[in-house]
Image (cartoon, coloured by chain):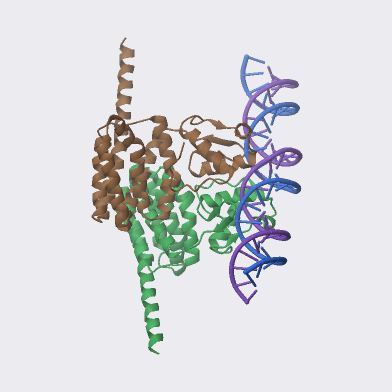
Chain colours: A green, B brown, C blue, D purple
Amino acid sequence: MKTNNPTQRAAVTTADKVFEQIQHAIVEGEIPSGSKISEPELAKHYQISRSTLREALNRLEKCHLIERKANVGSRVVKCSIEGLLELYVTREALEGMACRQAAKNMSDEEIAHMQAMLKVHAQTQDLKDGIAYYQEEGNLDFHYKVILGSHNKQLIELICGQLYHLVRMYRCQFGMYSPRASRAFDEHSHIIQAIADRDGELAEMLMRRHIAASRKNIENKISKEIIQKEQTKIQLIKS
Amino acid sequence: MKTNNPTQRAAVTTADKVFEQIQHAIVEGEIPSGSKISEPELAKHYQISRSTLREALNRLEKCHLIERKANVGSRVVKCSIEGLLELYVTREALEGMACRQAAKNMSDEEIAHMQAMLKVHAQTQDLKDGIAYYQEEGNLDFHYKVILGSHNKQLIELICGQLYHLVRMYRCQFGMYSPRASRAFDEHSHIIQAIADRDGELAEMLMRRHIAASRKNIENKISKEIIQKEQTKIQLIKS
DNA sequence: TCATTTTAAATTGTCGACAATAATACTTAA
DNA sequence: TTAAGTATTATTGTCGACAATTTAAAATGA
């Protein structure tokens, strides 16, 4: 399994490799969200010493996948609705700005390459597994390309190097493939158009709305679920 | 010397303490920007083993003060104009959003507290060392309060936990106390007003302009310096 | 003299063991 | 039986040593 992360340097040291393995395990939920991490246990499992395991843990902490307390230990980060919404807010800010910078700094070649990529997606869009592809890999690809297009190392590091592992984790564990597939595709098209027009202001606005739309989609879902719960509660009381 | 960092947990372990010491040394330029870090040397200097030094180095990497290469070692991050401008762009995005969230989420007490703080600053503003104070501590304080006011853990961690050490580093090493003191004070007042009015959109816009103004101030300074250099070049050629 | 290869030194990565701290189980007293 | 205090166990933090890799220096050949 490849992580498909353009910012992540090749894993040369064993700590790097173990880091990637644990990262994958956490993202996929094999190591449950919120669970405590036992250093001796994990070290034994991966056949490495505690020192190199701790090196790997440090990198996991860097991308916000685990949290450490002094003299107590590490826990896998707990997925929560609030955490997810906070993540969306942060992404809206960072990716919005990245998109603005992309409109300013992307080369014509880069833009052409993105437009070509989108065309490929358009052709496979109607196919059933095409939609799935677009929602998973394609969507990430698009966002990655825009972020890298900002040519801003700081933004790239923060978003691709840190936040996106959390994004993938939430996507895996909450598994919310919304009915926004085709709409998202149109939004991507408009964003690329704004970038091609070198209209940074519009590009940022569109990207922010694109991300905010996903967030609101979730917020609605949640509030609906709460209403449903309340109603079942009332029914229980009545009966 | 106190770091005055509300997000930083108390340093209980020796790695924590050494981390803070090295952090201070890097920010203040005692360990020069861009220089290589020798693990055996530093470990000897702080009277600790390499293991705990490496633990400290990992935290320094987390707040972007050093960069590590596998099998090669660590370097203190190199201060550059591009890096500074990138940092401003990132701050504009993150702190702008934090300000919007603050307008939404700050309690009335928190807002009152900030307004009171600003009043104190207003009184000391005219004093000569008051201006210095305002530019250094007060300015940071203001931004910290707004960020914390967002009540968004993700944003708080990214800005206060990571970026602001870099901000302090640039402030120390480039030492650019612009003639924006009194203007910055007015801008802060307007931002608080927008927050008090619960006008998130305006609050974000004002914060972004506030930060962008500093960035543009630097960009102007740089371009002027370049023009000056060109002119002296021309003069050298003529003579 | 310069370029290339080999050798040596230094630095980083990894390991296992011990010390310090926190969590658990047990004992004792009310 | 419950509460508090103590003792035990387990976990994390720290250490020094060895292995792997990189960097520097020396040697060899053209």
Q: Using the rendered image of the protein, determine whether residue B192 is visible from the camera's viewpoint.
A: yes
Residues B7 and A21: in front is B7
Q: Using the rendered image of the protein, determine whether residue A14 is visible from the camera's viewpoint.
A: no
Q: Report the residue at 62% width, 48% height from top.
A: A15
Residues A232 and A181: in front is A232
Q: Report the residue at 31% width, 55% height from top.
A: B109
Q: Is residue A90 left or right of residue A37?
A: left
The answer to which quarter of the image holds residue A30 is: bottom right
Point out the image quarter for the N terminus of chain A.
bottom right
Residue A228: percent from left, percent from top: 38, 78
Residue A132: percent from left, percent from top: 46, 66
Work out whether B198 lies above or below A228. Answer: above
Most extreme residue toward the bottom is A239
Q: Is residue A198 left or right of residue B16?
A: left
Work out whether D26 lies above or below B101. Answer: above
Residues B111 and B24: in front is B111
Q: Is residue B130 left or right of residue A159?
A: left
Residue A14: percent from left, percent from top: 65, 48
Most extreme residue toward the top is B239
Marks counted in the figure total 0
Point out the image quarter for the C terminus of chain A.
bottom left
Q: Report the residue at 54% width, 62% height from top.
A: A34
Residues B24 and A214: in front is B24
Work out whether A234 lies above or below A214. Answer: below
Q: Report the residue at 69% width, 52% height from top.
A: A48
Residue A113: percent from left, percent from top: 41, 49
